[in-house]
Each structure stands twice: as structure tokens, then as C-alpha cells.
Image: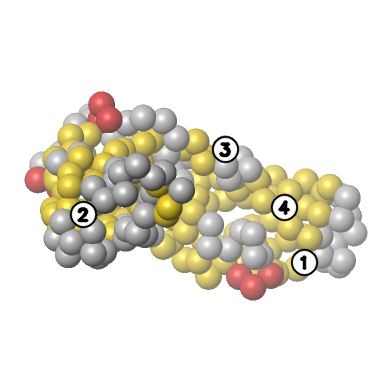
Amino acid sequence: MSISSVYTFSFSPIIKEFDSKGNGRIQTFRIKNESDDPIAVQISMMTRAMNRDGEEINSDASDLFVIYPHQLILQPDDSQSIRVQWNGPENIDSEQAFRIIAEQLPISFNKENTNRGQLNIVYRYVGSVYIIPENPSSEISIESVTPLDDHLVIRVKNGGNRHTILEDLILTLSDGIRTVSLNYDDLPHMAGENILAGIVRDFSITRPSQLTGENISGEISYKETR
């Protein structure tokens, strides 16, 4: 078995916002073959949801978008524009999150050594697409703080209609006697996380030694970032 050339391509932008109606429901991406060999690429759309532990859940969303072209062959150093159109509801109350996937198909264009086995190494880009409602904003709050051994489970909810990334994060915790403030560097598994609209997430952090009580409350501040 031989290993084929490692085909590479670029795909941009990796994040794109769409309007649900009007001209903004159509957006353009660009793909370029940066290798010395022809490649075949397929573009697809997936839904994007997330459970409380942060595990992403995806399913086919091809009925909500029109992609042209959705499959293509790129010659070396060739580039191509990809037109993507939102085909879902015009009126939405909350931001809709999706994944756009550009994936190299495992097709060999090398006609030499056809009697030998060949392993094609494929590339895959996974980007973010958001369908934006009117008057979008995030609204992050702490729903509960649950002691669990030497950790605290912080339940966070985005009650807004738009996602946000938890930048410049400050988490203030109190057991009624003492108050502790934790900043971005103190919260490595929470800071910088993307909280989708309407999503509830659970984050486990090390319990500050100053907080000895069992009834702990929390407040959060952050810079709304997309």
C-alpha cells in the first residue's frame, strides 16, 4: 500500500453570519486547492446543538440550505466561490446555529500504479454558520452552584437569543460568609467557551478553599463576544 500525496486546501471564512431574509440570506465562501494535485471536495451543512456537558450534537441540515456547487473538483492552485443560501424560515426569534463542512473526497486522480493499493489522506474544515434574528443579544446567568466533593458544578444558561463566547470572564461565588472572585485564568474549562442561544451548560471547577458552606451562589460577568 502506498500513501498518496497529502492534499491540502483552504476554506474561508470559517465563521459566517446570515440574515434570515433579504439579501443577507445568501453568503459566499471560498475554497482553494493549495496542493500540486487535483482534489475533489464536498460542501455540506449540519445542525448544531449542545448538551449540558458541552458535547456537540449534529444532524443533516441539507433541507435548510441551498449550496452551489456542493461538490467540485479543483485543479492545482485553483479556487472556487461557494454560494450558500438560507432556505429556512424568514421569521426566527432566536439565533440558529449550524456547521458548514468542507471535506475532501477520497478520490485518487493519479492514474499511475493503478495495481497498487493506495491510502488517501483527506482534509476536513468545520466552520460555524449563524442565522441571526432581529435585536440579537446574549443573556448569561448562573442557574445553580452545586458542591460535589472538592469541586463545584456551575450551571450556566444563555437566556438570550444569540450565542456568545465567554471572554473577560469573572465568576463571583459566595457561601454567605466569604466571597471569592475568579477571573479568566482561574477558569480554564469555562473561559472562552461558546454558549449557544437558549443552551444550558454545566462546568466543573475546583472549589475555592475559602468557601466552606454548602449553600453557594454565583454571579457572572463577561464581554459579549462573537
Read off the residue under disc 3. Answer: 51
- The residue located at (17%, 44%) in the rendering is 72
Amino acid type, mark 1: Thr
Q: Earlier in the sequence, mark 3 or mark 1?
A: 3
Q: Which residue shows up at 10% across the image and 42% down it?
A: 22
Residue that numbered label 1 is attached to: 179
Disc 3 versus disc 2: distance between alpha carbons? Answer: 39 Å
Residue labelled with disc 2: 38
Q: CA distance from mark 2 to mark 4?
A: 47 Å
Comparing marks 2 and 1, which lies closer to the viewer? 2
The one of 35 and 218 positioned closer to us in this rendering = 35
The residue that disc 4 covers is 204
Q: Secondary structure at mark 1?
A: strand
Indicate the position of residue 125 as horizontal and vertical percent values.
36, 53
Amino acid type at image mark 3: Asn
SS of the residue at dot 2? loop
Question: Upstream in the sequence, badge 3 or badge 4?
Answer: 3
